[in-house]
Amino acid sequence: MDIQKLQRAVVDALEDVKAQDIKVFNTEHLTSMFDRVVIASATSNRQTRALANSVADKSRSIGVPVIATEGEDTGEWVLVDIGDIVIHIMQPAIRTYYNLEEVWGSKPVRLKLSPESTRPAVASSETAFDPMGTRDEPEGRRGASRSSRPARSNR
């Protein structure tokens, strides 16, 4: 199948389930394993799974088999491999942390997208990805560690 038509089918499937901040990167000059990388944001685990299912269903409906799907168990980052295109569907905090745009190229393929699809997704501080556990504790808990409590007296 023509890569342009396949790319359009993937983007349409993502837009159908309201993906945000869709970017498509031409990777022909970087790897022979696939021609495009698509990165999209979702606002919840449920939406990442729904987007992955939408892409897989659309792909099968046009005769392109799904080679693999990874990450559906957690739903924070789901990858769908359809051969010529690899699709990363990520929650905003994960996407910001891993910054795949930097890996695959700074200039995305130009596409006509719906206005909702181009809007960047924003992570709330409550759902922000913090792999090192460095996020500050809430105000009331700072300094309330065990060692800062007064010692018990045995009197």
Image: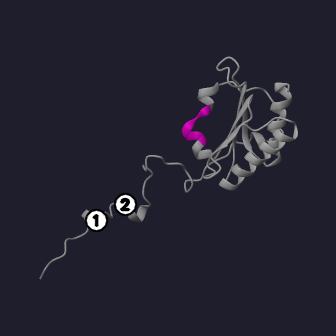
Task: Write the residue at 37% across / 60% down.
Answer: 142
Residue kind at label 1, given as amino acid type: Arg
Picture layout, residue 64 above or below residue 42: above
The kind of secondary structure element at disc 1 is helix
Image disc number at residue 142: 2
Task: Write the residue at 64% across / 51% down.
Answer: 75
The mark closer to the camera, 2 or 1, is 1
Task: Write the residue at 86% across / 29% down.
Answer: 5
The percent coordinates of residue 36 (x first, y second) are: 72, 27
Picture layout, residue 59 above or below residue 24: below
Task: Write the residue at 13% across / 79% down.
Answer: 154
Quadrant of the image for the N terminus? top right
The percent coordinates of residue 49 (x first, y second) are: 70, 51
Q: What secondary structure do most residues of the magenta stretch adopt?
A: helix
Image disc number at residue 127: none
Residue 13: in magenta span = no
The percent coordinates of residue 61 (x first, y second) are: 87, 41
Residues at circles 2 and 1 in contact by the CB criterion of under 8 Å: no
Image disc number at residue 146: 1
- Count the marks: 2
The kind of secondary structure element at disc 2 is loop
Q: From which residue to which does the magenta span run?
A: 95-100
